[in-house]
Image (cartoon, rainbow, N blue to C red):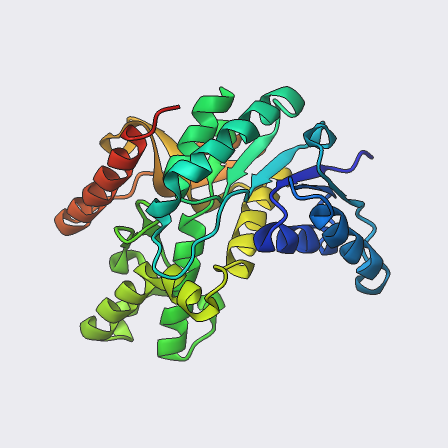
Amino acid sequence: MTRRKIGLIGGGQIGGVIAQLAAARELGDVTLVDVVEGVPQGKTLDIWEGAPVFGADSAVVGTNDYKELKGSDVVIITAGVPRKPGMSRDDLLNVNVGIMKNVAANLKQYCPDAFIIVVSNPLDVMVWACQKLSGFKPSKVCGMAGLLDSSRFRAFVAAEIGVSVEDVTAFVLGGHGDTMVPLIRYCTVNGIPVTKFISAEKLNAIVARTKQAGGEIVNLLKTGSAFVSPAVCALEMAESYLKDKKRLIVSAAYLNGEYGIKDYYVGVPVIIGENGVEKVVELDFAPEERDAFNKSFVHVKEMVDSVKL
């Protein structure tokens, strides 16, 4: 049986954690590409040397050559400049779009059939640029953001109530930034509305913290940004594709009329299976939720429309 192949572009903190977790979970053989000589080679060698202890036979290879991505079933893109204290995700726009141009050209050449998951910021623009520059089917290109934002929301809710994080479900839609939309009405604890456990005042504080969660970590680290939680979320999406799990995951997905939006990427619930993004799930919004979602999309649209590819 041929093992699946997972390509990773970007050997920074997120790429390194994804490589480690993918190998440990034996989701497939891993190829990590980075432009800096020695970085991907060193990180993958370190992982491989630990494989006998954590008990995984996945091959893990580091390289500076994009051609080694040939045959990848999934490619996760983390390449780009990370945020520094005081920076917003939007501040990274021009430099990271420039990096994406090179990445997309190599995707077209070496792995035209892969499912692409973009993690680089500003996420909603980067995934749009990746799809446009590569020419891949929109269903084969998506962005990791909504799952991460929803996970943060769930963690904060679980801590406030004092319950297992496994029992909290939540949706955070819209752009991956300060205008994201945590939907309190869709947040439950094992099916029970979260409003049965937490006051409106505390819920509003959790919503505000969720919107600023990435910046909170940047300010604490001072020399980097979040890397474990984004890595876990990206790999969760990859696993749903590789195993055809049909997971319902909030992702930055291409919209073709859904939610009244066409030809843009924004965070919405989708089903990810062997064909990529197989279905966009449209939620019913209350008027204030619709207004918040539309406001978030306008911000995404303004950034996308400012990009010259």
Q: Position of residue 101 (x, y in %)?
A: 50, 28
223 or 235, nearer to the observer: 223
Nearer the observer, 267 or 61: 61
Q: Which residue is drawn at 25% across and 70% down?
A: 205
x, y percent for residue 160 = 35, 77
> Is residue 191 visible in this depiction of the protein?
no
Quadrant holding the C terminus: top left
In the displayed structure, 264 sits above or below 248; it is above
Residue 108 occupies quadrant:
top right
* Quarter assignment of residue 97: top left
Left/right placement of residue 81 relative to residue 146 reads: right
x and y percent of residue 259 in the render? 26, 34
Classify residue 297 as left or right of residue 222.
left
Point 61% across, 36% down: residue: 75
The residue lying toward the viewer, choosing from 298 and 185, is 298
* Residue 162 in the image: above or below residue 90: below
Left or right: 271 in relation to 195: right
